[in-house]
Image (cartoon, rainbow, N blue to C red):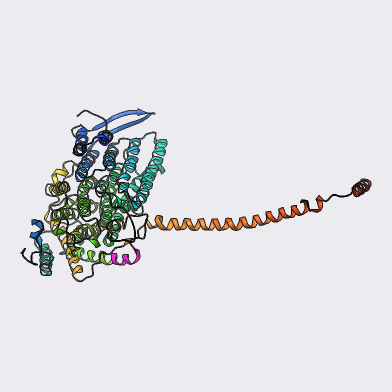
Amino acid sequence: MPEIGTPALVYMVAALIVPFVRPATLRQILLLAVPVLGLLTFWQLPYGTYGTFNLMNMHIGLMRLDALSYVFGLIFSLAAFLALLYAWHVRDTVQQVATLLYAGAGLGAVFAADLVTLFVFWEGTAIASVFLIWARRTEGAYATGMRYLIVQVGSGVILLAGIVLFYRETGSIAFSKMGLESPATWAIFLAFGIKCAFPLLHNWLQDAYPAATITGTVTLSAFTTKLAVYALARGYPGTELLIYIGATMTLFPVFFAAVENNLRRVLAYSLNNQLGFMVVGVGIGTPLALNGTVAHAFCHILYKALLFMSVGAVMYRTGTSKASELGGLYKSMPLTMIFCVVGAMSISAFPLFSGFISKSLILSASADTGHFFVWLALVVASVGVLEHSGIKIPYFTFFAHDAGHRVKEAPFHMLLAMGITAALCIGLGVFPSLLYGILPYAVDYTPYTVTHVVTQLQLLLFAGLAFAVLIRTGLYPAEIRSVNLDFDWTYRRLLPAALSGVAYLVQGTWRFASRIVMGRVDSLIAGVYRAHGPQGPLARTWPTGSMVLWIAVLLGMTLVLAYI
Amino acid sequence: MTDQSNGKTEGMPPLARLLSGIDKPRNVARLFYLLLAVCVALGLADFFYSKHGYFAVEEFPAIYGLFGFVVYAAVIFLAKGLRLIIKRPENYYEPFAIDTEDERAAGSAPEATGGKPNA
């Protein structure tokens, strides 16, 4: 494969060609070939920086290939392939082009060696991905897409401001370890934090992902947030603040996910919680922790895509993704059910599934460095993961009360995409060395010890037992049709209400003030009119004699004054 | 095991037929006691190997299991409490949200109009 700078180029060129390829099957084959070609451009290259040139005295490097970017490049290519396979039935050119551009921008950003290239692709992911939401073509999706775009572009603008300050400060735009030292690096940190869905900056995720098309959500789940995790791992490893941000991120979505009815939104909360584990890993910053972050991102992209795929397949057949409307689907979609359960067991970190071999790196790293409470938070969050993703998703979709849907099994291409992803989830869980071998740092870690397997099984199965007890006693919260308020209420309701309140006040004050002023002006004009108008005393015609008399009086007074 | 409920399994995929009846109350109870038995066995297993934990608290027998059980229940009860505060009608953010669009498209919420999501 010739050296072409960045694999993003393959995706961009393909996005230009795809709309003109007419036969649908040929177009699908071309789409599937793109991630493969993209992978081949960097697959065998030795580590180093490629596509370098000078632009206005700044060193641009389009592709930095090292141990960190390589793993993310690999998993992004894989995710793009699986998402495109899952979307084989889609005949919508907008979605096809958007998927290519989005995946391409994600790869471009991961390989960026400098902050300017990073910024360009960072904004690229925002702009390309919003079309996966708008492609739903409804009023609600349009509004949701707008909110998503504002947040994402906002992140890009803050990043740009940070880069400008950083360049002024250091004279360099190289993207390497920065740390929180100046306003510049704080701004860049904030930009990364928005895309990484830090607490209170997170609601774009739960808002937008359930609003995208079925296949669009699968694509969205892979790139944006993991790009942010990569950027944090590159720029801020060992930043202590991240440990606490990450621990908070693992905990609070658990409660929102437990009462959420829309299963795609449950998965979005779950995604947020999984990002927390990765952020903790970045914050700890030891080689073991960073390996954990990278491994967890790798496994997470796969099992999260698998879960979104299975819920998407259910939605494709039944037209809904709400727990209250689903149930009993194992009778109609047993294969989808099995793949969903594989995803659920992977994310819950059952032994022999991928989550087990990646999450434990982060937990061990937090325990190794003596962060007892952080470690405890992660264990609590692990139980929470089991609750919303491990049990709730498969149970209320495929079991629970039979909602009466009698539908066909998912289409073959969806089953194939889910099957490959499920096989990867189990494969990584059974053969962890496959993944450990490509991690950035050489760390000797054995996930399968007696202690670890037994304690993990205890944690998960006893929690499962608690679920069974709560279901049998009727204490488990029922799935009801509702929406739940989250922090986005502040900018979807509170802020607009406050603004309209302010507008009302300003308008009232203005009306009052203008009424007073206008009244004064009116009476002034009326007064002037009374004096000077056609009937006013000053407009009367006086006899010449009286004028002469008044002039004589004035002259007399002037003389008197002059002599006094 | 598949011939229960007078031919209801007809038309099901073969794999589903294997599982059919799993949600019958008797089978659910069996699964529950199976899970209970596995949990007890796992708890007892702690006495038969030397544990290598990071913190002293991990040495307590079956601590992970007890912790998992308690935390799970606590999460559920806290979430139920949270729901009292944050629950709103499904059309709360309409028309600037997608929350009822699928139902409107399917006709199960006929009071409103909307488009079918583009798969």
**Left or right: A133 as drawn, with respect to A357:** right
- For the N terminus of chain A, the quadrant is top left
Q: Position of residue B33 (x, y in %)?
A: 11, 68
Q: Main secondary structure of the magenta part?
A: helix
Number of residue marks: 0
Between A184 and A470, the one lying in front of the other is: A470
A269, A296: nearer the viewer: A269
| Position of residue A197 in the picture relative to residue A437 (left or right) | right
Name which residue lies at 31% across and 57% down. B99
The reply to whether the magenta stretch includes residue A323 is no
Relative to the observer, which residue lies in front, A355 or A535? A535
In this picture, residue A432 sits left or right of residue A263:
left
Q: Position of residue A245 (x, y in %)?
A: 32, 53
Q: Is residue A181 visible in the rendered structure shown here?
A: no
**Magenta-tinted stretch:** B78-90
Is A414 placed above or below A394 here? above
Q: Is residue A138 visible?
A: yes
Q: Residue furthest bottom?
A: A473
Q: Position of residue B66 (x, y in %)?
A: 19, 65
Q: Position of residue A527 (x, y in %)?
A: 74, 55
Please say whether residue B88 is one of the residues in the magenta stretch: yes
